[in-house]
Image (cartoon, rainbow, N blue to C red):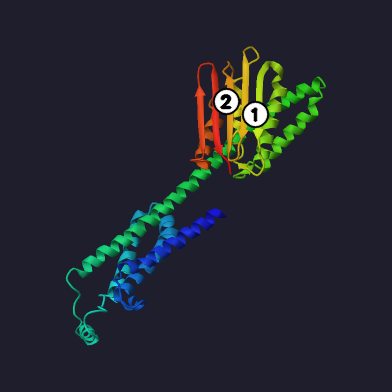
Amino acid sequence: MNSKINKLIIHITGCLALLSLPLLYTPSLSSELEFIRSRGFQRDLVFSIFLILFFYLSYFILVPKLYFNKKYIYFFSISVICFLFIYTSAVLFFPKPLPLHGPPPHAVAEHIHNKMPPPAGYFFNEFRKLSLQFLIVFIFSLMLKINNRWKKSEKEKLDAELSYLKAQINPHFLFNTLNSIYSLAIIKSDDVASSIVKLSNMMRYVLSESSNEFVILEKEIEYIRNYIELQQIRFGNFIQFDCIISGDQKNKTIAPLILIPFIENAYKHGVNAEENSAIKIKIEITESQLILLVKNNKVVVQRSEELKSGLGVENTKNRLQYIYPTKHSLIINDIEKEYSVSLTLNLK
């Protein structure tokens, strides 16, 4: 809703700016309303109104129907025809500003009666001024529509990447977790029921919340807690594990599944029963920021090429650039024996 209101305000401001241009070209007059009788003001006002109409013609019809469909000849030809029509209408109907000061009324009447030609260079100067205004509106409508389409395509791309990320991660995680729960069931562990509940809550969160642009921070943290607890059940005590989550989570929102890929990556590349496996996770929530620190020892792990690609982390980087373009800081240190991530987000 805020985005639509902002767009409406921008369009209204642009229209008012165009309609105010005639005042800039109107000389100072003695009467407050005297400028309305000025041919120059009337001509520029008519031209500005036509410019607004052309802007929306170009924005809603010419650019999407012709330019985006690569019908460039039609697009530019119609634009030129529109300019010639607008220019001709403005200049022919208001050919020359009549002086409101200087000559007495009878001299003005005589000027009209004799149909004296405009001064030399008048049409050229008017053509140059009006064509510049038209060109600015023409380029602005084109660039604005291209920018909107680019943003829309980027959002669609990132949404597709997020869907792919979920499709890639969740079956894998689900399969491994079910194996862990099955192992617990065989030994009749007391953790079976709670594990099933945690897994159910996670799947419900992914299905119902992850499609939203932002979610309640408490739910995202709960998802992360459930994930970590299930992984701890799965891997047991051979991991040196440390997790700290601190700070007030209330009345804050965050993009869904924006943190979990970094945590998941630590388990994916930092767990081997035959090596020193250590994972440290710290989430600190302040008044306006969330700070995520994830660190793991690098161990030898046999993975398929699909899992080695690191698509989850790469997709998350792209999402961060789109959702938090100037409101995040991501530092990744990949050294010989250790991998660490430091992410700072400005919360909403």
Residue 281, image x and y in percent? 62, 26
Can residue 40 be seen by looking at this rendering? yes
Q: Which label number is shown at residue 307?
A: 2
Q: CA distance from mark 2 to mark 1?
A: 10 Å
Can residue 303 be seen by looking at this rendering? no
Residue 64, image x and y in percent? 44, 55
Q: Which label number is shown at residue 331?
A: none
- Which residue is most to the left? 120
Query: 28 left or right of 8?
Result: left
Q: Are marks 2 and 1 in contact (CB under 8 Å)?
A: yes
Secondary structure of the residue carrying numbered label 2? helix
What is the quadrant of residue 35 in the picture?
bottom left
The residue under label 1 is which amino acid type?
His
Mark with earlier residue (2, 1): 1
User: Residue at left 81%, top 22%?
Assistant: 189
Label 1 crowding class (10 Å Cα cut-off): few <14, some 14-19, many 20+? few
Q: Which residue is mark 1?
A: 172
Residue 98, image x and y in percent? 25, 78
